[in-house]
Image: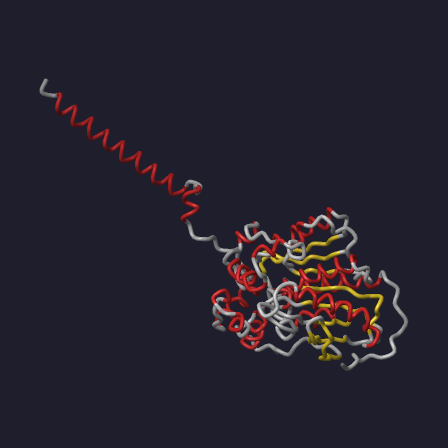
C-alpha cells in the first residue's frame, strides 16, 4: 500500500509530458496550416510576383531617382515626379549605353483643333517612300499625368516596327478637365487623322489605333465611336494593358496591390482626380469589359504584363470582344510590369512586344489596298 503514492506520481509525470507533447504538436500544426479568414485579415498584403532581372533593374533605378508615391501628391506634384522612362534613361547611363531615342526619319511637332482648343500632337515618319499607313497613338498616365515626351519611346518603336507614320496625340487632362474631356479630344484626333493623313504622306485608307493604359481605353473607345458614328473604321486596334473595367477587386488588383510602378492606391488616386464621382467609372466608356455591344469593332491585339493591376481588365475585355465575335490576339509577358512596353532599350521583352505589335499592324495594313500616292510628305501648318 505504500507504493500507491509513487505510482500516482509517476503517472502524473507521464500525463504532463504527454500534454506538453500534444501542445507542441498543435503549435507546429497551427504554424504550418493554411491561413484562415481571420489570419488572412491580419496578414500584410502579399508581395507582387517577382520581376525578371532586366525589369527589376529598371524598378531599382526608379527607386534610386527618389520619387514620392503619387497617391500622396497633388496632380501638379505628381506630374513632376520621375517616370519609368526617366528610370530607363538613368539605367542606360549607368550601363554606359547610349540614351538617344530610337531614330526615325522625321519628327514633326504641331497641334490640331480639338473640342476644347488646340491639342499637341507629334508625328513620327519612318524611313522609306510613302504613302505610309498611319497609326494614331494615345499615351497613358491615368488621364492625369504624362505627356508626349513621357511616351516618346513607344511611337518611335511602332513607327519602325510597323513601317507606319505614327501620330501621337495629347489630350486635356484631369482634374482641370474631368472625364470625358480626354475621350473627346482623342476621338477628335482620329477624325483629324482621317481628314489629313494624305497631307503628311499617309495613306488615309490604312489607319490603325494603338493606346497604352488609359490610352488603351481611349483607343478602344475610338474604335467603338467609329462604328457608331459611321466613320471609317480603323483596320486594327492595339490595346496595351488598357483600363477596361471598374472592378478594383479583380484578381490582378489583389495580386499586384503593392506593385510598382502602378498599384491599386495609384489607380484609386487617378479615379479620384479624373471623375466627378466614383460612380462614373461604371460608364460604358470605362467599364468596357462589361459591354455587350462590341460586335463590329476593329480586330484587336491586347498586350498584357503579369505584374500589373490592369491585367485582369485586359483579360476581361478580350473575353467580351470574343463573345461579340471580334477577332482578338492576347499576348501576356511574364516577369514585367505596367509601363514595360516602351522600355525596349533596356528590357528584351519590351522589344519583343514592340516587334509583335508591329507585325500585327503590318498584317492589317497589307490586307488593305494602298491608296494613291499623297501629294505632300509634310504635315500642314496650323
- Is residue 164 at all visible to an observer of this figure? no
Q: Is residue 45 above or below residue 368?
A: above
Please tell me in which quadrant of the rendered image residue 364 appears: bottom right
Above or below, 83 against 318 in this view is below
Q: Position of residue 285 (x, y in %)?
A: 67, 57
Residue displayed at 23% across by 32% down: 16
Query: What percent of the width, then of the height, locates residue 201?
Result: 82, 75
Q: Nearer the viewer, residue 317 or 348?
A: 317
Please tell me in which quadrant of the rendered image residue 375 appears. Answer: bottom right
Q: Residue furthest bottom?
A: 381
Residue 159, image x, y percentages = 74, 71
Question: For the point 47% across and 53% down, which residue is it?
Answer: 46
Residue in the foreground of this view, choosing between 26 and 65: 65
Q: x, y percentage for residue 367?
A: 85, 60
Q: Quadrant of the C terminus?
A: bottom right
| Corner quadrant of residue 107 | bottom right
Amino acid at each position: 500500500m505504500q507504493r500507491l503514492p509513487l505510482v500516482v506520481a509517476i503517472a502524473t509525470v507521464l500525463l504532463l509530458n504527454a500534454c506538453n507533447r500534444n501542445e507542441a504538436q498543435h503549435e507546429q500544426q497551427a504554424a504550418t496550416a493554411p491561413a484562415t479568414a481571420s489570419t488572412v485579415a491580419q496578414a500584410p498584403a502579399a508581395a507582387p510576383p517577382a520581376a525578371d532581372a532586366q525589369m527589376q533593374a529598371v524598378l531599382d533605378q526608379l527607386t534610386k531617382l527618389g520619387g514620392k508615391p503619387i497617391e500622396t501628391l497633388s496632380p501638379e506634384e505628381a506630374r513632376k515626379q520621375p517616370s519609368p522612362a526617366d528610370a530607363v534613361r538613368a539605367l542606360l547611363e549607368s550601363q554606359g549605353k547610349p540614351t538617344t531615342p530610337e531614330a526615325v526619319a522625321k519628327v514633326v511637332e504641331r497641334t490640331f483643333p480639338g473640342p476644347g482648343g488646340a491639342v499637341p500632337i507629334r508625328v513620327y515618319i519612318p524611313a522609306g517612300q510613302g504613302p505610309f499607313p498611319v497609326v494614331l497613338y494615345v499615351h497613358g498616365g491615368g488621364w492625369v499625368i504624362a505627356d508626349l515626351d513621357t511616351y516618346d519611346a513607344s511611337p518611335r518603336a511602332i513607327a519602325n516596327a510597323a513601317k507606319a507614320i505614327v501620330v501621337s496625340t495629347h489630350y486635356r487632362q484631369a482634374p482641370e478637365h474631368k472625364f470625358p474631356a480626354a475621350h473627346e479630344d482623342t476621338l477628335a484626333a482620329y477624325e483629324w487623322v482621317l481628314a489629313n493623313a494624305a497631307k503628311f504622306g499617309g495613306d488615309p485608307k490604312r489607319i490603325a489605333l494603338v493606346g497604352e493604359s488609359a490610352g488603351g481605353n481611349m483607343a478602344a473607345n475610338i474604335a467603338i465611336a467609329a462604328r457608331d458614328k459611321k466613320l471609317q473604321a480603323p483596320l486594327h486596334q492595339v490595346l496595351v494593358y488598357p483600363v477596361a473595367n471598374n472592378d478594383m477587386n479583380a484578381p490582378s488588383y489583389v495580386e499586384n496591390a503593392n506593385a510598382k510602378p502602378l498599384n491599386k492606391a495609384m489607380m484609386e488616386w487617378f479615379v479620384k482626380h479624373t471623375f466627378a464621382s466614383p460612380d462614373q467609372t461604371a460608364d460604358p466608356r470605362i467599364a468596357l469589359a462589361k459591354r455587350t455591344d462590341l460586335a463590329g469593332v476593329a480586330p484587336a491585339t491586347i498586350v498584357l504584363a503579369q505584374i500589373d493591376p490592369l491585367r485582369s481588365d485586359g483579360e476581361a475585355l478580350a473575353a467580351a470582344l470574343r463573345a461579340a465575335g471580334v477577332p482578338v490576339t492576347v499576348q501576356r509577358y511574364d516577369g514585367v510590369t505596367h509601363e514595360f512596353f516602351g522600355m525596349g532599350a533596356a528590357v528584351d521583352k519590351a522589344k519583343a512586344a514592340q516587334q509583335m505589335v508591329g507585325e500585327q499592324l503590318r498584317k492589317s495594313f497589307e490586307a488593305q489596298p494602298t491608296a494613291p500616292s499623297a501629294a505632300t510628305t509634310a504635315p500642314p501648318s496650323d
